[in-house]
Image (tube, helix red, strand yellow):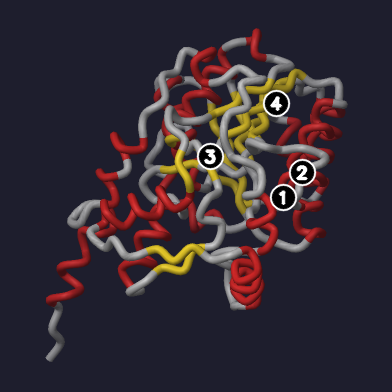
Amino acid sequence: MQKLLVLGGTGFVGSALCEQLVEHFGGATGRLVVPSRRPQRAKHLLPLPTIELTEADIHDDAQLSRLVASSDAVINLVAILHGSPDDFERVHIGLPRRLARACEQAGVRRVIHVSALGASVSGPSHYLRSKAAGEAALAGASLDVTRLRPSVIFGAGDRFLNLFARLQSMLPVLPLAGADARFQPVWVEDVAAAIVRCLDDDATIGQAFECTGPTVYTLRDLVRLAGRWSGHERPILALPDGLARLQAGLMSLAPGEPLMSRDNLDSMRVPNVASGALPGLAELGITPASLEAIAPSYLSPGRGTARLDEMRATARRD
């Protein structure tokens, strides 16, 4: 493949994937086209050889068709965690549907689509139902599609463990909704490696793979570990369902991206763990890294963004 189109390539998973793809192709052959409405926010990708950042709105049919037409394969990472039903419809269903149409028109068959663990048309949340509908939109087209369904993804710069570490650095007690929800976190580099393996192996066409780490945790466990590794472990106050929904509703009204929404709570009613009904990372030849082996390296005081804590605490201004 000489040209790959990576939708969502400027994000958390996309950045890890671009690095692995450049390494995989040797940085000498092939180009990675990464569209963004704000390419200036993706300057961290510029040092990578063969990366082509281009300004484009992938929700515009004409621009999406132009991008697809000059590609040999497409990787779709675009997703949102929060939003209205219309937002989920536009991003998780509308985009895959339009992508399928653009690929068929351009004769581009190969598509890797990253969905979500627990995606189901009968799921309890807009997020899970829309993810399933997006998968169906691609599966119903005349394309060579591979689907990946990751659990919650962790790694340096994640918005999951880092969020809970930061909250515990500010609060004496952490009120926690969905404390007993179960997750099987997977390292971002393992998800990226799975995408690369699927690109290489035509036997993965038509299949779906569950991407999970080796261990199942409750949300309470994960929050406690994030606090411990960051040096800010706080008592956790598990909220009953009524208070949890009230808290999530209030958070969704705050400006900016909410920390939690009622739709998130609904998603957590489904254990975010491997079902065993689908192949996983092992079938792709990947031994998933454990949370304990990776997360302390970027959450511990003096590491990752936490390395600035001491400087902030001791800073003096005249």
Q: CA distance from mark 4 to mark 1?
A: 21 Å
Looking at the rendered structure, which numbered label has been put on residue 127?
A: 1
Looking at the rendered structure, which numbered label has been put on residue 111?
A: 4
Closer to the camera: disc 3 or disc 4?
A: 4
For label 2, the residue is: 123
Frontmost residue, 101 versus 83: 83
Q: CA distance from mark 3 to mark 4?
A: 19 Å
Q: Which residue is depicted at the point 60% across and 44% down?
A: 8
116 vs 107: above or below? below
Which is more N-terminal, label 2 or label 4?
A: 4
Q: Secondary structure at mark 2?
A: loop
Which is more N-terminal, label 2 or label 3?
A: 3
For label 3, the residue is: 52
The amino acid at mark 2 is Gly
Q: Is residue 192 left or right of 173 when viewed as pictured?
A: right
Q: CA distance from mark 3 to mark 2?
A: 37 Å
Q: CA distance from mark 3 to mark 1?
A: 31 Å
Picture quarter with the C terminus: bottom left
